Amino acid sequence: MKYKESIQNKGFYFVLPSLIIYGIFLIYPMLSAFHYSFFKWNMISESKYVGLKHYIRMFGDRRFWNSYITTLHFTLISVVIIIIFSFLLALLFQERIMFKNVFQSAIFLPVILTMVAIAVVWQFMFQSTGVFSNIFLDIFGINIKWLTSKSVTPYSMILVNVWKITGYYMIIFIAGLLNIPNTFYEAAKVDGTSYLQRLFYITIPLMKNTFILAFVSGVIFSFAAFPQQYVMTEGGPARSTEVLALLIYKQAFEFTKFGYSSAISVAFFLTLLIFSLIQFKIFKSESDY
Amino acid sequence: MLKILKYFSLVLLLVIFLFPFFWMVVSSFKPTSEVLAIPVNILPKNWQIDAYTNLSNYTEYDFTRYFINSFIVTFFAVLLAVILCTTAGYGFAKYKFKYNNLIFIIVLSTIMIPFQAIVVPLFILMRDLGLQNSYLGLIIPESLTAFGIFLMRQFFYSIPDEIIESARIEGASEFRIFWSISLPLAKTAIFALVIFHSQWVWNLLLWPLIIISSPEMRTIPQAIALFSGVYFTPYPEQLAISVLACLPLLVIFMFLSKNFTKGITLTGLK
């Protein structure tokens, strides 16, 4: 018994390297963000304790709230569209289709393209003489300012985001659909149910976990968006696409307000934390994983 | 009729999803005068590779160097990630040491720490360690993936304890069991981890922007972001370098597309 226990404890040495590295480079910086948010400093002069000043300032800062709402708007609309769209695609690919692989690979292609490169080409297509603007003008007869209108540009950003990651979630949903035993459908067919009935009473309830997972990971991914906005708009026009990650970057590395930037980081972290906790709660009550 | 509609929408989707990439490639072979001309030419009137050859004329950008940097960083960050994730995943899955579950939950909860939220303190830490403008400064933070630990742990669970136990009876050391029995069994999961993580590291922009200030240490996404931000950079050149940046991942995808989707399935469901 004693011998067994000493072997079991050896497992700790396998875990130790990760604990050290994650501790130093992930957990410590996260705790420091809280710490730094109470100090005013710019790397050059001595740092100064300012208490809750940064938080008070943040709550009254219209630029922060604009950024916060911009990020929420971008995230929620993107994720809802992506989930519905990719689920429909997965359903479509359940059917017998010629050249299925070709179609699937095409939809998956944007997933593996470098985000910065994607931002460059979409920015190019969105130019007033770019191909996307022109096609739109030819078909619908309206000239849309994809990157220069405060009301349109946030949706241009969502469009690119949807285009980029739909393929990824399509594959997740295809895998989820394959996990549903065929016997369920056969039994339902014997009972004379319609396609839509089977969809709403069998497929969707059984896919609940996949939906939750897709939602959580989609939110975490989109909430952290940065390269796209950095390259395509730099947060403009009129700060309509200044997402939180971009604001954190600008506050720290353009305005050298490290303390204030850290306070925004904390708000960013807490938002995702609260969101994830709610999700985990749903997760826990719904499944036995 | 329904069938026609189905294929029509599929072809439409195909065009929509492929077009931007197609457009990036063909436009990079056009001369500057043609690239934003109206009416739009789909294919270049005369194909030319000037945009690619011109890249070497921008003396303040050494793109070859940036590619090498990106390769080095991606390779070592992924290697380190594999080492950390397999060892930790194995330890969590196959040993019942004290506080195993508690420690695992703490590690897993770091998934919720968004990288964007820690960049400022991480930058200060790396600067204090003297790792600014170094490969190590890029590699270490980019090798962290709590998700990878989770993935490997789930995978090692599926390996029967009897295999390990019988090796122990034959007197193999714990590390030897891990190295020559358990690791080879985990090939599929490691493969998935490598594919996912290399894609992630290759594409990172924010961290290089922060930790790298000296031009010769830039990574390729960082260089493209800076290059395309310069007002007088012609579009064909921007697109040419973008095409080149996408190539390595495209090649990997072409050869390993089966593993790619398998990997997503593996990571997506557990």
Image: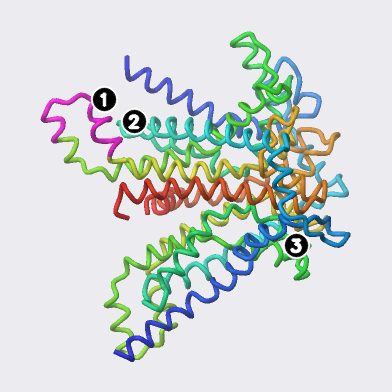
Circle 2: residue type: Ile
> From the viewer's perspective, is the residue at label 3 or at label 1 nearer?
3
Q: Which residue is mark 3?
A: B124
Q: At x 32% / y 87%, what residue is drawn?
A: A4
Mark 1 sits on what residue? A196
Give the camera-side residue of A54 and A207: A54
Q: Position of residue B82 (x, y in %)?
A: 52, 66
- Magenta residues, dominant SS class: helix
Say which element carries label 2: loop
Q: Tell me what residue is drawn at x 31 percent, y 34 percent.
A: A94
Q: Secondary structure at mark 1?
A: helix
Q: Residues within 10 Å of mark 3 (few under 14, many from 20)?
A: some
CB contact under 8 Å: marks 2 and 1: no
Q: Which mark is drawn over residue B11?
A: none
Q: Is residue B20 in sight in this rendering? A: yes
Which quadrant holds residue A3? bottom left
Does the stretch in magenta take in B99? Answer: no
Q: Which residue is mark 2?
A: A97
Please rate how many residues cluster around mark 1, counting C-alpha atoms within 10 Å: few if below 14, some from 14 to 19, many from 20.
Answer: few
Amino acid type, mark 3:
Ile
* Chain of the residue where label 1 is placed in the rendered structure: A
Between A207 and B117, the one lying in front of the other is B117
Please tell me whether mark 2 or mark 3 is closer to you in this view. 3
Q: Quadrant of residue A215?
A: top left
Q: Calculate the distance from the C-alpha at mark 2 to the C-alpha at mark 3.
A: 54 Å
Label 3 and label 1: CA atoms lie apart by 56 Å
Residue at x-position 59% and y-position 64%: A27
Q: Is residue A203 magenta?
A: yes
Range of residues picked out in magenta: A187-205
Q: Residue furthest top?
A: A141
Describe the element under mark 3 as helix, strand or loop. Answer: helix
